[in-house]
Image: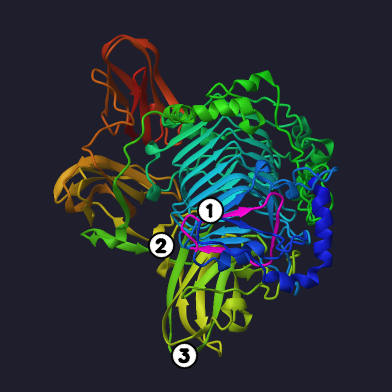
Amino acid sequence: MRNLYSYAFGTIVMMALGLTQTANAQFTTCPASPAECVVEWDGDGDFLPDINALRNTVANDTDRPEDRVYVLRRGGLYYNEDRIVNDGFDLRLDGQTADQARPEDNVCGASGTEDCGPATLQRFVRDDGTVDAVMIESSNGGGHEFSNLWIMGQDNTGITANYEPIVVNSSGAMLSYDGVIFDRNDWHHLGVKGADNIVLMQNSSFRNLTENTQRYGGRGIRFEAGADSVVFENNTFFNITSFPFQSEAAPIRSFTFNHNTLVNFGLAFNAGGIWIRSFVSNNIMVNPFWQGESADLYNEPNRADPFSGVFGVAALPPRFGFEENRRIALVNNAHWRSPELENYYTTFDPVVRAQPLVNDSTQSFFNLYPGMVRQGNINVSPNLAVAPLTNEVYTTMQSFIESVTNAGPTPFAILDWDPGRLDNPLAINWPLPEDFSYTTPALLTAGTDGLPLGDLNWFPAAKATYLANRTQYLTDIVDLTGPPPENEIDGLIVQAEAGTIGDNAAVNSVEGFTSIFVTSGGFIEHTFTVPTDGTYGLNINTDLRGSDPRGERFLLDGLNLENDDNAGELFFCTSAWTGGTCDHPIATADGFTVYELRNDHLINDAVDGLVLTAGTHTLRIEPVWGYQAFAEIEVVDAGGTVVDTMTPPEAITEGVEEVCEDDTQYCPQGFKSVNLDMDGSVTLAYPIIEGGQSVTVVFFYESESGASGELLIDGASAANLTFTPSPEGSRGTVTASRINITPGTHTFTLSTTTGDIDLDYVQFAVFANPNSTGLEPLPEGWSLGNSFPNPASGAASIQFQLGESADVQLAVFDVLGRKVATLVDGPMSAGPHQLRVNTAELASGTYVYRLTTPVGVQTRRMTVVR
């Protein structure tokens, strides 16, 4: 086994660290052609790895062809002290397969002639004790094409505290991974910061990604700005402390997760549920959400649902599109949690709650929207052949659960399973000990494609069938969600206060203390002015929200302000932090307090970053750790005098949460809204692009009493609007759907006729086709009419027509997707029909009624007023 090989030569390497300065200069000189360049890891042929051999080869290959491929030797040990950088070019790393290995590469196993496994990339601590926490950094469109590699997150001293060894700053890049083993890290190997990337992950493995200081570490992959499309097929995950996926700030526009096996992931499948197109199918999940949820989580104030659930769907922020245009399938997955965990949860008082596959909030989306489908999921144990499901593993899980539930001291237990691996940071356990095949009959043909569930690499014959029919199999899954939506060709959100304010209307600014809360994406951007050249400081009023420490990216005129070598960003901590030394502690992690950032706090490239020239400067805050609030930031001169103050209402923001002093009150975007009394008006100008033929206008508002109004386009009436009372502290919405229009700039005027509202912002969506109604148009002879009267305060009538006799359902749902009435559910004759809805027992608000037929589905809205 390769343990012996790695251990022996790892020991030699550690003994020979004094030679690394010479080794640092060694690299392979790549030819201009062919594209393939075989990178040697021991240039002298002495089995002593040349430190930075791969890094220096890439750095010195300045005349590389566009299709350059760096070929890594089978069993090669590519150790790096400094990061590999691909700035503006694609990095292709192709590890040799066993069939491609030279005889002299096969020196493993008891005989010394066996396969040594994939080439390994691993970080080394420098001679001076410092370490580059990043292994690979990609920028300016630089993508990845990695195959047959073992990427070890643990460095040569055994430290796994690297956060994200692979950093992707690029946007619009292709990131492809095939046969890559991502092993041993405390957070996630892949941190994708750029937007619009395409990620393809196949035949890869995520192993032992564990964190021992908090419940939220240990993840698979993190997206800070969403992605264009992400595809995971035939991969294996095991021992993930928290989430396999995180994409909270922006959606992945198309997400396919098909035929994967996940064993022991500690929290939900996904952190963030703002999917647009998401197809999660044919997977096996063993011990999902194994941490369970303790009372401190499910008793949090303002929590909407008592359970989180394994798979979550969240409301789509308006800037990303419309709910009815989403397509989500959660189909034919097997999920099972062991009795060792289920029974252990009940020993706590109050109990730790086992989590269902979906909670009620997520189920409401599946109930309400025909384009969201949940079906064929089964609760069955696969009885995997060789897996981390031993008594020792369950004991470790239980210890971790006890620690996080009872706020025990760190470090927590580390969930690590790698039987046969030597206790050496350089050891590579090859061949892999896990075998996730199974013989459970219920799962062997349970896929939407009739194939076994889970990673088909454990079923080679089934995988061959899958690859031969892949396109059709994936199409069949997509088709479960119905026909594709007609997406808008243009759109914009416009703040109400940016419009022309008419009579009986006024801009309303929030009074009192304000702050901005950042989660995992978005930004806060301020400008400030200093009167003279000099050295300045920042008094940052912040709230860590109980999480100690935090770290965020502060970019001052583009310069990343660093104050701590452990973080790579601006670090906030208290003296009570036990994970290290806090050089610049703040008073508390609970509540707002001021961190006085001074120029002498700054390190690395940020040294003298607060030595500024007279004039205007830009400060941009981006989340790294996230989940931190910021209020005002004072700019002070060397004597401590305040020369400018940056406040939340003055900031430019995106993807963050505005917070007002009274958290029960409505808090508008930008801390401003437009108040319209009766006969009030506000007018917005919006250009319809060439090719646009219809527009949908959505008004976001707050109103205690409700109101009625009218939308006028270029002064002509286009739609009557009813603003129902909005729940306390939240926005309501009113939609004027698919109004036919011509290209060019038009004025859109909201005029109230009764009541009053606070208008926050308006969303415009332009479509290439003239107006149509419903999610799925019914064929000729089938139709669903408008309810009458609308709004209704008593009985309302709904007309519909059937083209032939059929089993149909007509049901009414509230805005949370809960079914509140079923008008018909069974056979009906062909022809026109009319049914009455008794609204007497319904609260005021907007409802959706949906007609489901064998030939399609159609929905419309109705409003109930009291």
Residue 651 position within the rendered picture, expressed as x and y whole percent measured from the top left = 42, 68
On whether residue 76 falls in the magenta region, the answer is: yes
Using the numbered discs, state the Cα–Cα distance from disc 3 to disc 2 in whole angstroms: 33 Å
245 relative position to 767: left or right: right
Observer-side mark, 1 or 2, equals: 1
SS type, badge 3:
loop
Q: Give the residue number, with chain letter if any, for mark 3.
A: 533
The quadrant in which residue 125 appears is bottom right
Tag of residue 265: none
Q: Amino acid at mark 1?
A: His
Q: Give the residue number, with chain letter if any, for mark 1.
A: 144
Tell me which label, 3 or 1, sits earlier in the chain: 1
SS type, badge 1:
strand
Tell me which label, 3 or 2, sits earlier in the chain: 3
Q: Amino acid at mark 2?
A: Phe
Residue 297 position within the rendered picture, expressed as x and y whole percent measured from the top left = 65, 47
Observer-side mark, 3 or 1, equals: 1
Using the numbered discs, state the Cα–Cα distance from disc 3 to disc 1 in whole angstroms: 44 Å
SS type, badge 2:
helix
Tell me which label, 1 or 2, sits earlier in the chain: 1
Residue bounds of the magenta highlight: 64-87
Quarter of the image with the C terminus is: top left
Tell which of 730 and 315 is nearer to you. 315
118 relative position to 682: left or right: right
Q: Give the residue number, with chain letter if any, for mark 2.
A: 671
